[in-house]
Structure formats: structure tokens, C-alpha cells
Amino acid sequence: MTSSSAPSRKALSKIACNRLQKELVEWQVSPPAGFKHKITDNLQRWIIEFVGASGTLYAEETYQLQVDFPEHYPMEAPQVVFIPPAPLHPHIYSNGHICLDILYDSWSPAMTVSSICISILSMLSSSTEKQRPADNDRYIKNCRNGRSPKETRWWFHDDKV
Amino acid sequence: MESDDDMHDANDLESVDEDFYSDVTGEVSDGGDAECDFEDDLSDESDEIVSRHQQNYTVLNETDIRQRQEEDISRVSAVLSILKIQACLLLRHFNWSVSKVHDEWFADEKNVRKDVGLLEKPVKMANTGEHKCGICFEVYPRNVVSAAACGHPFCSSCWKGYIGTSVSDGPGCLFLRCPDPSCNAAIGQDMINVLGSDEDQEKYAYYLLRSYIEDNRKTKWCPAPGCEFAVDFIFGCGSYDVSCNCSHIFCWNCTEEAHRPVDCGTVAKWILKNSAESENMNWLLANSKPCPRCKRPIEKNQGCMHITCTPPCKFEFCWLCLGPWSKHGERTGGFYACNRYEAAKQEGVYDESERRREIAKNSLERYTHYYERWATNQQSRQKAFADLRSMQSDKLEKLSDIQSQPVSMLRFIIDAMLQVIECRRVLKWTYAYGYYLPEHEHAKRQFFEYLQGEAEAGLERLHQCAEKELQVYLEAEGPIDEFNDFRSKLAGLTSVTRNYFENLVKALEHGLEDVGPNRQPTCTKTSSSTNTADKVKKAVKSRASGNGSRSAPATSSWDSHWMCEQCTFANPNSASACEMCEH
């Protein structure tokens, strides 16, 4: 029950609730271009749909992100994964896990869902090759039983893509 | 604590002992023939022995550490004319090297500022109006929000959460930056102390102190469990051995316990080997052995290897080889040889599998041989430590009463015990040395084993005297006349043993370079081994005869003898060269 693999199971703290409500209002006023928040009554899990930017390898492809917020959001980073099928990208694993520093070590509480979305879109847009990470199969095997990407010790090899 | 002070005192006494020796050396300085070259070389370096005892390190307690840290911060702050808090961040960034901070700063201030997160022009928040916290997005009046030099406002509760999250993640909090993702401004201890919880402030201060020791190239914590001292080491002179105020002596380079004459690499190999083999060794670690004669189990509760079974058996034997002690002592002309490992002789014809089994068995046996001696010396050393403590806390005073001697005149007993502890340590590591000494270097091995055997015999003599012979005076009803003889005997044995061990350590550290191919003219393989054999024979002979003069302590005073500084043999003054080793 107390397993860290399920940070989203614990109810949001009051601070987290307040902050998420503010983010949601802000999102409704000015959502990041190309992103759509699927309305649910669950404040702790957001499903976000977006379309790849035109003029990039992912133009006109639609993907879904699942964002789970921990109890102490925003002091702790949310867990962000693609709902399969995930885009073919050298930093995105076939189970939807994303290798992006701001989701883990470089998270800052001053970031928002909106800023995460923009980072992910920019990561896709700068890709020059549609392919899986080299260690995809090995990683997927290690992630069976629904391990959270936040448990992975990520190495952020290159910041070009 | 107590014992540490004594260690220093022991070192202070060094000079006295050197004087005691220089007379002796003077008398025999011309006695070097080919056989004794080895020791001659060493005595030439006796100046070095003295210099080695000059400390090349400083032990620091928490107050010292804080003071040094504060001094470094003040220095940088003054030289660069920046705030102390900025100086602290800079020093932390450059691993507390003041000179590195100066170099980098004056080479490229702008870049350093950028890397560390020190803004050139601080941005002031407007003093009035409302501010939106960048984390919870609530709007607050000015007095609730704070910002680092960059002016990005956050409310006090978000700051508290931000600092708390970072501090609970560990020492990484020393690199804390403004929460704004695009901002690089460093958060220093001043902010932590205003905005963090009490607990976080304390932890931060603790990490900062630890960092000053751990990230600094010149300092390390003492590795002894529970010890809170750190050691500042000055590179370039002397050995790596440092003695902490908690009385733990360790190698500053590898932080294992002090291990001269063995090098750090060998120690690491040996320790790894021990942990891998430890299951096989468990039976060895059991502290009891059956008496070789009556088979009753005996627990070794005294430091030296000479064991006497309880009456009626009273069998005297050697704890290491379980052979009769009579074969070990000088008394019967036997010589101490159970430090030697002789591989089982292979006789007759073996088939392949039998041969392989034999090899496996031999290699385990060989390791066991060295391990057991290594571990036994370790245990003896610990026992000697305990003895020293009981001597200092209780027995010394008792002895002073019985023998009507001031405690200050009993200093020689403490010195002897400290020497025993040090010798046990050296001896212990000579077994790791022996294990890794290549099998094929026969001359070296033989010479090494000879030297080690002599060392062991010398130490046993000292240990015996400090432990058993002392007992008589402790149990006496009143003063015994011979106490002064005992004093000179024990003091003499102590310095002679110290000298022998110091020379031994040096010789082994130099890889026994006097033996082997580079010494062709005097020591070809065959001649050196015969030399050694000769020496051993002579040693046996002269020790047997020499023993007579020493076993009559009431009449023979040490004034009428001089002690050979290499082999510890007491020669009559009439002899111009050592009767034993011809030095």
C-alpha cells in the first residue's frame, strides 16, 4: 500500500489541490497550442490529447499523455507517460515511458503541466528519426508489473533531440 | 583518549632512545661484511626514522573544522570582496580549495558567477503591492513572499516545502537554485536559515560541515565507527599512517587500518580474499584449541603465543603450531620457525585428479596458514590494547604502591605495552606480505621468513617480559630489589624491538631489494641462501650460549652489555662485533 510505485494513489494534499485547481483554470483560459485536456472529475489524473506539430515527423499524429499527481505536488514531480501507442522516438519507450530530465531530476515546483506539455512537444518536434531507444526491449522487460518511470534511474544522454 | 596521549608521549621519547642507540651504533659501525649489508643500509637511514615521527597530519574536531571553514570563507570573502554567503557557495563549488577559487575567479569571473549562480546585479522585488507566488500561484502581500538575488517571488510556505524536499534528498541541497526553471540563482545558507524549518536548517548545516571534509582533497573522516574526528593530511612527506585522537590508527590513503609494510593494493586484495574465504575460515576463528597433550580445550586469554596448559597437564606449547614450546625458545637451542610455511612435499606418483586435489588442498592450506597467523596477531593486538587500558586505569598505581616507585618511574611499562601493540600490527601485516611474496623467489622468501621469525621471536620475548615477568612484581608483598633490573631489561627490550621492527618495515617496504638479482656480486641466489642458512645456524648457536649471560639478571647488569641493534642480542662489552650476527 505504501509502495512508492504508486505515488498517485495517495490523495492530494490541500496545497496540491489548490495549485491544480489554479492550473486547470489557467489551462481553460489559455491551453498550450495543440493540447486538449479530456475533462474528467478526477483532479489527480489528467488525460491530455495532442497533435504533432505540422512540418515535423509527427505532424497530424494524435497521442495521449497520462499525468498522475503525487500527494505533494508540486514539490514532487508528476508522473507523465504516453498511453500506448507511444510515438516512435529515441527517448520514448514502447510502454510510454519518457526519458526527459524535467520529469525526474530537473523537476522544479515552478513548472506546470502546461510547461511539461510544451517540453514534450518540442522534444518530438526536434526528432530527425522515428525510432525506439536502443535499449527498448531490455527496459520494457525490467518494467513489467507496472513499474513507475519515476523509479528508473534515468541517464539523460543527449539534449539535442 | 588516554592511550592516544601516551602514543604522542611515546614518540616524544623517541629522541632519548635514539641517543641510547647512537652509542651502540658507534661501537659497531665498522662491523659490516657482506652478510650484513642489509642491515647496514638501514642503519644509515636512521635519521629518516626520526623524521618519520614528525606529524604530517592534523586531527580536527568539530570546532576545529568549523573554525577552518569559517577562516576559508572569510579569506575568500575578503580577497574577492564578496559576501560571506557567496564565498561559501564559491568554495563549495570548487571543493573548498581557496586557491582554486582565486584562480578561477580572477581568470573568468563572469563564467564562474554563471556556473555557481551568483548574480552580478541583484534584482530587488518591489517593496509594495502584491506578489504572485511562482509555485502555488496565490497572490500575497510583500511581507509573505521572499526571493533570492534574482527577485523571483515565492511565498514562505512554498519556500519551506521547496527547501524541505531538497534537504531530505541529501547533500545535493548544497547546490540549491531558485525554483524558477529558467533561473540559475544560487540559494545560500542565509535563505535556508530564514525560510527552512528548524530541522532542515540543522541538516543543511550538517551537510555543509560534512562537505568541507568529504569534498576537500586534503581531509578525510576517521573511519573508526562512531568517531567524529577528521584528519587533515599534508601530501608529499612521510607515510600515510595517521593516528586519530580516538586512538584508531589508519592509512590515510585507503582508510583501512594502518598496514605498513604492506602497500594499499595488497591490503585490498588480502581483505577481499578474507571475505571470500571467510566461510572456510570460520572454524579458525573459534577461539579455542585443544591442548596438544591432554586435549582439553584451551581459550587463549593472554597476548603471547606461549601457552601453558592448566595443571596437572602443564604442557607448554606454541599456540600457532601446537608444537612443544621447548622447541621454540632459546633455552633449548631451538629457534622460532612456526612463521614458515612449507608446502607439503609431494612424493611418489600422483594421478591427475589426485594431483589436482592436492593442489587445491595445498592452496587452501597455504592461505589458511597465513590467515590464521594474521588473525591471531590481530587478536593478540586487541588483547594487548585491553591490557594497556587495565594497566593505565588500575594496575600501574597498584604497582607503584607495592614497589614504592612513583608512577612517573613506571612509564617504561606503558612504553613496552605500546610497543607490543605496534609490533603486533606490523607482524600481522607481514603475513599478508608473506602470502603475496612470489613462491619462486626462494632467496627472498627465505630471507623474509628469517627476518619475520626473528621479529616474532623478539616480540614474544618483549611480550613475555611485559606480561609474565611483570606479574611477579605485581603480586609481591613489598618492594623487590630486582625491580630496577627488570626496568632496564624491559626498557632495553622495548627499544631494541622497536628498532628491529622499524628496520623490518623499511626493508619490506623496499621489497627486500638487498636480496635478488640486483645484488649479484654478494648475493647470488645460491650464495644468499647459504648465507641465510649460515646465519640461522649461527643464530641458533650463539643464542644458546648467549642465553646464559642474560638468564642471570641479579648479577648481570645491562651496563656490562651492549645490545646489537639488528638482532637484539646482548653482547658482553668485550665483544667488538655482535656474537650472533657479526654486525
Image: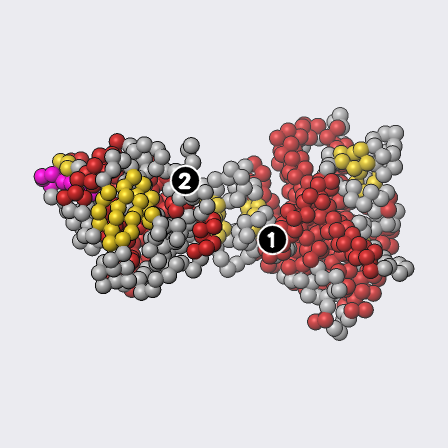
Q: Name the residue under label 1.
A: B268
Q: Which colour scheme is used?
A: secondary structure
**Above or below — where is B411 with respect to B264?**
above
Say what amino acid the circle numbered 1 marks. Ala
Q: Which residue is drawn at 74% across and 58% down?
A: B448
SS for tag 1?
helix
Q: Going by the image, does B71 lie left or right of B373?
A: left
Name the residue nearer the viewer: A146 or B581: A146
Q: Which residue lies furthest to the right in this view?
A: B348
Magenta region's main secondary structure?
A: loop
What is the chain identity of the residue bearing mark 1? B
Quick one: label 2, few (<14), some, or many (20+) residues within 10 Å? Answer: some
Q: Residue at x 60, y 44 (%)?
A: B10
Q: Is residue A15 magenta?
A: no
Residues under numbered marks 1 and 2 in contact, where contact means CB atoms less than 8 Å apart: no
Q: Position of residue A121 (x, y in %)?
A: 26, 55
Name the residue nearer the viewer: B390 or B405: B390
Name the residue nearer the viewer: B98 or B170: B170
Q: Position of residue B469 (x, y in %)?
A: 76, 37
Say what amino acid the circle numbered 2 marks. Ser
Q: Distance between the residues labelled 1 and 2?
A: 39 Å
Picture disc at residue A5: 2
Q: Quadrant of residue A44?
A: top left
Q: Is residue B290 visible?
A: yes
Q: Which image quadrant: the C terminus of chain A?
A: bottom left
Quick one: label 1, few (<14), some, or many (20+) residues within 10 Å? Answer: few
User: What's the magenta region?
Assistant: B127-134
Name the residue nearer the viewer: B160 or A73: A73
